Amino acid sequence: MRTVHVHTGDPYDILIERGILDRCGAYVKELSQAEKVVVVTDDNVAPHYFWRVLNSLEQNGLSVKPFIYPAGEASKHLGTVGELYQVLADFRMTRKDVIVALGGGVCGDMAGFAAATYLRGIGFIQVPTSLLAQVDSSVGGKTGVDLPQGKNLVGAFHQPLAVLIDPDTLNTLPEPFVTDGMGEVIKYGCIKDAAFFEKLETESFADHIEDIIETCVSIKRDVVSRDEREKGERMLLNFGHTLGHAIEKLGDFSAITHGKAVAIGMVLMARAGEQNGYTEKGTAERIIRLCEKYQLPTEWNAAFSDMAEAAKGDKKTAGSDINLVLLKTIGDSFTLRLPLEELNGFIDTTAPNISLEE
Ligand code: MG
């Protein structure tokens, strides 16, 4: 087993091991005084894994109640959380009891938010089953739900008791979901680790899945431990995300998935960085080649002015400025504060609607 310790205000461990799903109950017992557990999961994940988690919890003497919601980002709103609160209250969950979030990013965000707020905070354990959740969203303690006005606008920082990562769950994922997670995986190489980026370029993902997960969560752990509340360094994790979120928004959050939008956002920011003299020439080209290797898109048919406009609603704006994450080169990133009105000119590398392939 691989263990990554997270030294936040409430320290916890990320445990990576094939088959760890079946030991979930033992970890709940070890890490809490829980007698009851509500397992939050969606109707795609439940048929694959709920029974294994249930067995493990029951074998450890815990009473279990499932909360199964329709899969997808469309469920990540306060209405679903309201239904979950009902289940927690009817089951008479107390502060010592625990929520298990079994699923992808939506599940962890929503279950974590319920855990952060029910009884002013109860324990929860993340059992991420998608690559995106395993390498990214399950680590860092950000929880939340969407509002009609935008993604993740209501939320709380709440660290889990543990994150249990079972790489075998990736075997049941349809291919597009693994691809989506690769957007974030490549991001970690871009912002912090040139050697890791090179490894992704030269070797095959399938042969190194545990290494890849461990490297990504370790990078995120390091950044988050130094900046738990996103005041400085943590912003680097948003590389590709300002324009990525804008692209998701322009597609009404249904035309393109998060990881794919981030891939395009990384390419656009690398291009803009090169154009404006901040980024080493050839960086965007390397990112494009690596994204293509993992079937990620590298271009998006929208005007730069529309993307800039959509980006202005992003949480990363600071008054009349926006914080952009740029690369000096692969593995070396920094933030640049730019007046909002200069954003369009900064990212518009040529005319609107250009093809990014030369
Ligand atoms: Mg992300």
Image (tube, helix red, strand yellow):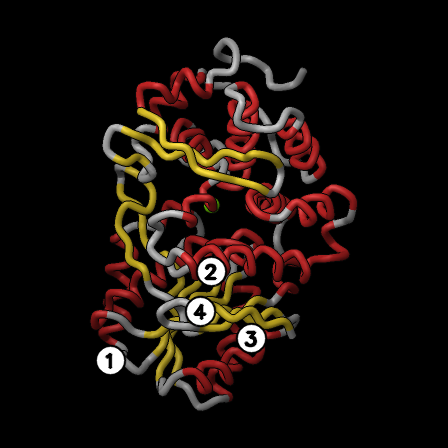
Q: What secondary structure is marked by label 1?
A: loop
Is residue 155 or residue 157 the one in the foreground? Answer: 157
Question: Closer to the camera: disc 2 or disc 1?
Answer: 2
Looking at the image, tell me whether mark 4 or mark 1 is earlier in sequence order.
Answer: 4
- Pick whichever of labels 2 and 3 is earlier in the sequence: 3
Q: Residues within 10 Å of mark 3 (few under 14, many from 20)?
A: some
Nearer-N-terminus badge (1/3): 3
- Mark 1 surroundings: few (<14), some (14-19) or many (≥20) residues within 10 A: few
Label 3: which secondary element: helix
Q: Amino acid at mark 1?
A: Arg
Front residue of this view, candidates 314 and 95: 314
Which of the two discs, 3 and 4, labels the residue nearer the N terminus?
4
Q: Which residue is mark 2?
A: 139
Please state if 278 lies on the left or on the right of 171 as rendered: left
Q: How many angstroms separate mark 4 from mark 1 (CA)?
A: 32 Å
- In the rendered view of the protein, which quadrant contains the C terminus? top right
Q: Position of residue 315 (x, y in %)?
A: 31, 39
Assess whether mark 1 and mark 4 are in contact (beta carbons under 8 angstroms): no
Task: Give the labeled residue for mark 1.
Answer: 92
Secondary element type, mark 4: loop
Residue ID at (45%, 15%): 303
Percent x, y for residue 174? Answer: 62, 49
Q: Are marks 1 and 3 in contact (CB under 8 Å)?
A: no
Q: Which label lies toward us, 4 or 2? A: 4
The residue singled out by tag 3 in the image is 52
Question: Which amino acid, by three-letter code, is at mark 3?
Answer: Arg
Q: Which residue is mark 4?
A: 7
- For mark 2, give the secondary structure: loop
